[in-house]
Structures are given as C-alpha cells and as structure tokens.
Image (cartoon, helix red, strand yellow):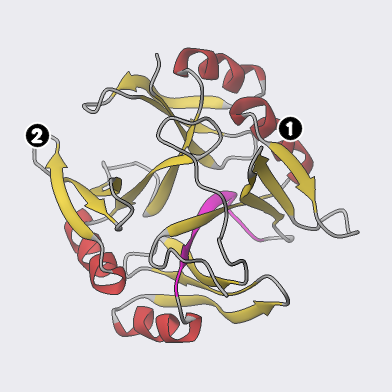
Amino acid sequence: MSDPSPCQFRWYELQTTDAAAAKAFYRAVVGWSAQHLGPQPEGYTTFNTAAGGVAGMMTLGEGEGPAQWVGYIAVDDVDAYADRVTAAGGSIRQPPFDVPGMLRFCGVADPQGAPFVVFKGTSPEGPPRGGPGQPGYIGWHELMANDGSKAFDFYSGLFGWTQTGAFGPAGDYLLWSDGRGADAGATTTRPEGARGPAWNFYFQVDGIAAAVERVKAAGGAVAVGPFQVPTGGWILQGIDPQGASFCLLSDKA
C-alpha cells in the first residue's frame, strides 16, 4: 500500500554537507527530534514531530551540492510520472530507484531547473500531517521560478493542481490547491538575483520573533523578514550554517 495523498508534497529532504551540524541547527530552530537510520555515520536521518517523521536528511558526497531542501511528491506510479516529467519538458536527475521496504523514487527537475522528487511509499498512511499553525509541520510550498506562470502550467498539467487566486502588485504570486482542502502553496517569478529556480518550504514554528533569535543563536542567518503576509501569518526566509535556504511560518509575531 502507498500514501493515500497522491500528487501532494508529503516528504522533505535536506541535502547537506554536515549532517551533525545541520541536525543541531534544525532541532534548535524548528523543535524537531532526530533519528539516525543505519550504522554508517553518513546514513539517513529523519526529523520528527511527536507523531512521527516529517522530513529527512542525507549527507552530500565530495563535490556534490549545493546544500538544499528538496520536496517529495507522492504519485501512484513513479516510472510513469518520470516519463510524464520528461514529456512535459522536465529532466531526470536520478533514475527510478527502490529503497527496499520503504519507497520507490525518482529525482527530477522541472523545465526551468527546480529539483523535486516523485515517489511511492510503502506506508499505508504516509507521514503524519499537522494542522494549520501546528509547530514542526510544513505549512506552505513556494516555487521561485524564472517564469512563475509557465512553471504553474507544468505542475498543474502534471499533478492536477488548480489555481485559486493571486497576490502581489502584478498578480504574479499564484496560489494553488492540491486537493487538501486549502491552499497548499504558490508559484511566482523570482526577483532578479534571488536564489532559484527552487522550491521553498515553510516550517511552522510557535512564534516568529522567538524563531529569529533561535536562528541567530544556532549560527544561521535571516535573509528576508520577518514580515506579515496578507493571510495574517508571519514569515522569514533564512540560510542555515551549511548554506541551505529554509523558511519559517507562524501565526504569531
């Protein structure tokens, strides 16, 4: 059996150059616990809430990089979706591969180069979900693309996401739903000089001001914000000590 939520982001993976340092950083900032899997020091680590794992971490090899967060989208047939990605103008970064007893996955990139993963897991229920504003869970998915409108067309055609609205002076912050009952994220055209094309994932915390202090104390940097968004929440965009971008979201200042 597999995750019953196809065509939605269901896992998030930090690819980093220093797993021990990154584990300490995200435990301090987000409040996750961490579990190391496998006997090797460079083995996989999961980041967990009280209900279970919601994200993971792997160590990049020599010369690999950059450090980054990559999202996993659940599908019902990994190989078929790999073909659909390339047919729609995307590319394969890592061919379909099995992790016995856990999942089959394929690393891909959209036509503008933003990486993501399509996967099919073996768990009957998939990773736990948190409620809106519940600390430790992922509350927003934001694609910073070279062309936000064209990027949305790619994902909409591939996964059936539907546009629900738009923000911004130019109306180019395109909101979309993936069927979970509320807006799940947005695509937009990245400002000149901004990182990307890439996905940003917003980790929910218990208050944005306190989170700013935790980011700084743990050796990270605040790149943008904090500021309040039109929905009333508060966000910041940061850089972890290994150079990976991350975002935080709270319903409290």
Is residue 15 visible in the rendered image? The answer is no
Residue 18 shown left or right of residue 156 in the figure: right
Q: Residues within 10 Å of mark 2 (few under 14, many from 20)?
A: few
Residue depicted at x 58% and y 22%: 215
Amino acid found under the numbered disc labelled 2 = Pro
Q: Quadrant of the C terminus?
A: top left
Amino acid found under the numbered disc labelled 1 = Ala
Of 6 and 240, the residue lying toward us: 6
User: Is the residue 7 above or below the residue 167 in the image?
Assistant: below
Q: Secondary structure at mark 2?
A: loop
Residue depicted at x 91% and y 59%: 39
Residue depicted at x 36% and y 75%: 90
Cα separation between marks 1 and 2? 39 Å
What residue did someone put label 1 on?
24
Of 250 and 107, the residue lying toward us: 250
Residue 85 shown left or right of residue 98 in the figure: left
Q: Which mark is residue 169?
A: 2
User: In the image, which residues are magenta?
Assistant: 64-75
Q: Earlier in the sequence, mark 1 or mark 2?
A: 1
Residue depicted at x 74% and y 44%: 18
Queried whether the magenta region covers residue 154, the answer comes back as: no
Queried whether the magenta region covers residue 66, the answer comes back as: yes
